[in-house]
Amino acid sequence: MTKPAIIFCGGDSPGITLPEDLVSTCLIISADSGLDHALACGIKLDQLHLVIGDLDSVTTTSLSAARSAGVEIVQAPHNKDKSDLELALDAALARDITHALVVGGAGDRTDHWLENLLLLGHERYRSLAVAMVSQSSFMSVVSDETSIVGQPGDLVSLLPIAGPARGVSTDGLEYPLVEEDLEPGTSRGLSNTFTAPSATIRVSSGTLLVIQPSPIDSSNPHFFDPAIRNFFDLGGNAK
């Protein structure tokens, strides 16, 4: 049976701790300096399966430790046509992974952060249920129907990416959508709120990026555990 994957990527430290019981069931992939973040998040060297990227930002100490531990390392040319995260997602596809959680990706490079978000909705990864978690947000991709979890009053935004999202309907949110079309750039799906511990989102065609921000005053490294567990229990969004 194919394992789900957790992909650590670069940028700022994600500042979260993943549930150990989930980590132990997943294929762990690090994209370049994502290796440093993986180790900082408590991932052990014997839990790592692959380090991939041009390796221009990972620390020498972490990379040497991974080599000594026998972790598979795939080094891409520095003048490559794909980002390290894209290479990691491609590696997941090549291993027949059906769903993957990306950890990290935010940082002071706005172009990298935006590209990481847009990459999640690329047509090439249509068969890969994917979500991303950082210290500030949990983000999932919806192209059919899915359920998300939170607490009443928690914020959630629905943003169309890679074109319009057609026939969007929701249950369990304060401002319901009923067979609505959301065009890229619209604020129609911004800052909705949970009215129950779970909500359902349906999309007839197109792709939504569902963003669940953490409270501004939250520093709990386990804040997104329910959303992460829900993602893995569901295998991501229904395709």
Image (cartoon, rainbow, N blue to C red):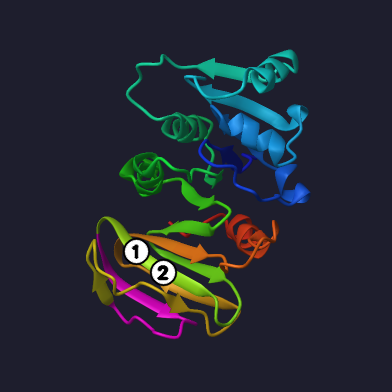
Q: Nearer the viewer, residue 205 or 69?
A: 69
Q: What is the span of residues highlighted in magenta in the rendered image?
A: 164-179
Q: The residue tagged with tag 1: helix, strand or loop?
A: strand
The answer to whether residue 37 is above or below residue 16 is above
| Residue situated in front as seen by the camera: 203 or 33 | 33
Asked where in the image residue 83 lies, by quadrant, the reply is top left
**Mark pair 2, 1: CA separation:** 6 Å
The image position of residue 170, as x and y in percent, is 41, 78
Q: Which residue is painted at 48% across and 46% down in the image?
A: 106
Position of residue 205 relative to residue 87, above or below, is below
What residue would you read off at disc 1? 159
237 or 122: nearer the viewer: 122
Task: Please report contact status of discs 2 and 1: CB closer than 8 Å, yes or no.
Answer: yes
Compared with 136, 4 (above or below) is above
In the displayed structure image, the side of residue 75 where residue 45 appears, left or right: right
Residue at (70% x, 59% y) in the render:
222
Q: Is residue 137 magenta?
A: no
Report the label total: 2
Q: Report the side of 200 relative to 214 (left or right).
A: left
The residue pinned by badge 2 equals 157
Q: Within 10 Å of the Cα at label 1, are there few (<14), some (14-19), or many (20+) other Cα atoms?
A: many
Q: Of helix, strand and loop, which one carries label 2? A: strand
